[in-house]
Every structure is written in structure tokens, then in C-alpha cells.
Image: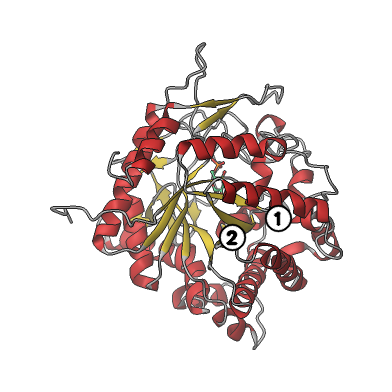
Amino acid sequence: MEHRQLDNFPKDFLWGSASAAYQVEGAWQEDGKGVSVWDDFVRIPGKTFKETTGDVAVDHYHRYKEDIALMKEQGLKAYRFSVAWTRIFSEGKGKVNQSGLQFYIDLVDELIRSGIEPVLTIYHWDLPKALQEEYGGWESRKIIEDFTRYAEVLFETFRGKVHYWVSLNEQNIFIQHGYLLGTHPPAVQDMKRMYQANHHANLANASVIKLFHELQMPGKIGPSFAYGPNYSFNCDPNNVLAAEDAEELEANFWMDVYVNGEYPLVAWKYLKDNGLAPETLPEDTQLLKSGKPDFMGMNYYQTNTMAFNPLDGVSLGKQNTTGEKGTSEESGRPGIYKRKENPFVERTNWDWEIDPTGLRIGMRRIASRYRMPILITENGLGEYDTLTDKGTIHDDYRIDYLRQHIQAINEAISDGVTVLGYCTWSYTDLLSWLNGYQKRYGFVYVDQDETQNGTLKRYKKDSYYWYQDVIKSNGEKL
Ligand code: BG6
């Protein structure tokens, strides 16, 4: 619908930006930090773009004060970051590593001093290697206790200081990449194991949220879900059904469990019929139902346009991790759906579809299915940037992208959706897990590239100044 007039953004809207520990911190062996599965994985030849690692990343561990000073100058209201589990417990459990914890105490204090609301992500994929080796990480129920204890330490430490918490970042992505595509650690390709690991992640997520509420933590907690709303390729009822199936298996399958503690009907029947359903215990439902989030964190990049895919149709296709436009392959689930190119939208050099209206559609679906506030925990454009001789970066394409997405949020608010805030991905440039350093997302350019010999100097992009004005005008000046 077209509104005659758009609502204003709420006065306390969190204009933010985000990062994740492995992608920015570096200092991978400092101050008692243990080894994570990613520290290991990136050393296996051929796993990441040009063998890039997060050993140094953009050195945020040593430069966080400089980065926060840039945020303050920009007027940022919120900064979403993640804690590396291996800094708190080098082996994933046992004795707390105080010097690792101190880094985050200092970071949070610096943010608060600068008037920036910290948004703390408890888990953004860097599982302690020790837990992977001891019991297979997410494949064991033991992870529930260890993850909960780790979260408890963070709750105790940051009570009253951190008011926004993200439990798991993109469970749907780390589980599918880790156990289906095999492109993230532990690089397994086995659907049955994937659904079992996923079930444990659901339980761990619920357990942490339940604890947060039992401790009466001041603030809110929720998971960040990577939501790519599904469209039908056209009005052929078979394609409409394929899109519905995709929504059921790729979206409701996670978000229904978060909110209602129950797997969605059609998806569960499909898993059962195909011998893929996870083993559950009678007490699981109670735990899942007792971990209802306070908001839905939504990471949004693109939509998926779906068509029917016969039983002998396409399965997993190659992804574009090189930045050579047009190199990604068609992929789908045989017998259910396959993803088609949407002819109505533009694509990035990594073949990601640019669809701001999809953000509005996704927000409305979440709001009306779950009746829950939304915090946009990620949204942004990964592109090549050029640093000029004058030290400037003219990223007007990123400004266009962000402007259109903020406009879509404004429309969703006007449609009746409650939105707590918007965190762009990302604050500084950082390491893209599989795409190296050349795929840049930040407001702040960092001199770091695939050779990993950069000076790490920071430069403000044009988008930095543009967002500064957006924040100052509370979204009026786009
Ligand atoms: C999300 C992740 O999936 O998307 C981020 O939470 C990630 O960690 C971001 O960097 C962008 O993806 P990519 O593959 O372009 O780095």
C-alpha cells in the first residue's frame, strides 16, 4: 500500500551498526584466548577466498578506542558486537579467563561513556574448538549446559550495562553451512545430522533466554534470524506452493520454534517422512516454550524467488564467493523448490539481489505471524570500494542501498510494525567469512586486503557522513 504520509521513526530508535568478533578483532592468540573452530578452519587450504584469515582481521582488539571514537563522532546510537566464547573460556568451559573478559568490559564501558547503546551478541559462529573435539559441538546435548554457563557469565558481568542481547546469530546459516553445504566448520554434509545439531541449538537458545528471564535481567533478548522472504516466481500454483514450502522449511522452521516452541506442521511431517527428524526428548517442548524471545532480530540481505523443482531437479549449487558477477549456480531442494533469478531487481557483484521492498514484506510477515517487536540486527551492501589519493571513498551505491532500505523500514513502521532499531552491516570494513576482505560493508574503510599486509588505517567513507545526517535528523533526512 502507499501511505499518504509516513509515520516518524520513534524518538528512541536505535540507529546502529554491527560487527562480529572473528571478523574484526584479530589478536587470535592474545590474553589467554583459546582456539575456535574458525581459527582452525581458515587454515585448511581452499576453504576461504585466497586463504584469508581473521588472525589480524581489522585489529579491532587493539583499536577499539579509535573505532568507538569514530562511532561517537558519527553520532551512532547503538553498536552490535559479538563476544568470542574462546576469550571467556579458552576451552569453552571451566575457569573464566579474566583477561579475555576484561576486553569486553573495557569495550562496553567505552561505548557507554560515548553514549552508545551496546548490543551484545553471545554467539556469532566462533565455537571453541575444544567443545567440537570433545563432543562434536552442536551435535551433542552437552552444548546446552556449556552455552548456558557461558551466557550466565556474560549476564552477571554486564547486568545493568547491556540492555540488548542477541542469543544466537543466524542459527539457520551456521547450521546449514556447517552441516549441509559443508562450507563452514565442521564442514559436514549430512541432512540428518544437520537437523539434530539444529535441534540442540534450539534448546541452547531457549535455555539462555529462559535464564535471562529467570535472572530478571534488565533489558531484552532475542535471536538474530537470517530471513530471506520467499516469493513465488509467478502465479503458477505449483510455484506458489514451492514458495510456501520454502517459507515453511527455511523460515517458519526456525522462527516458530523461537516464538512458540513448536516446529511448524508441514515441515515436521516432511522431516518425519524422509527420516530426517531430530531425536527429541519429552521435556524438550517445555524448555523450548519457556525460552520465548523479547524481540525478533532480523538480518536481512535479500529475498528468494522460488519455483517448483521436481524430484530429479537441481540440488546444491555453487555460491559466488569471488565477486565475479553471474558465477553463482542455481540451487534448490529436489521435489520442493529451486531458487530463480528475480527479473525485477538488480544484483550485486556477489549476485545478491537488492530488494528493499523485501525487507518491508519480511518485517510485516514476522510482525503479524509472531506479534513481536523487531530489531534489524544486520542489513547492508557488500561491494568493492576504491580509496582515492585524497583518502576519500565515494560509495554512493552503498548510500543508495541503505537509503532505500531505511525507507522500507519507515514504510513497515507506517504499516504497523514495531521496530526497535536498525543495525547496518557493518561498522568498519571487516573479514567476510568466505569472501575475504575485498567484499566491503563498512562506513569506515580499513586498509586491509587479501594480502593481509595493509596499514589498518581507518578512512571515513561518504556513507559515514550520510548516516551521520540520517541519525541527526532521526531518519527524516535520507
Ligand atoms: C551474515 C553474517 O550472514 O551476513 C555476517 O551474520 C556476514 O557475519 C554477513 O558477514 C554478510 O555475509 P558475507 O558472506 O557477505 O560476509
Dot 1 beta carbon under 8 Å from ligand 1: no
In three-dimensional space, the C-alpha distance between marks 1 and 2, rounded to whole angstroms, equals 35 Å
Q: Earlier in the sequence, mark 1 or mark 2?
A: 2
Say what secondary structure mark 2 lies in: loop
Bin the neighbour count of mark 2 within 10 Å (Cα to Cα): few under 14, some 14-19, many 20 and up. Answer: many
User: Is 5 left, or right, of 150 in this rendering?
Assistant: left
Which residue is label 2 attached to? 162
Q: Nearer the viewer, residue 395 or 201?
A: 395
User: Do we see residue 183 in this rendering?
Assistant: no
Q: Quadrant of the C terminus?
A: top left
- Residue at x 68%, y 44% (from the top left corner): 22
Give the label on residue 18, or none. none
Q: Amino acid at mark 2?
A: Val
Which residue is label 1 attached to? 188
Q: Nearer the viewer, residue 431 or 110?
A: 110
Residue 227, position in %: x, y? 45, 57
Q: Amino acid at mark 1?
A: Val
Q: Nearer the viewer, residue 42 or 477?
A: 477
Residue 341, position in %: x, y? 37, 43
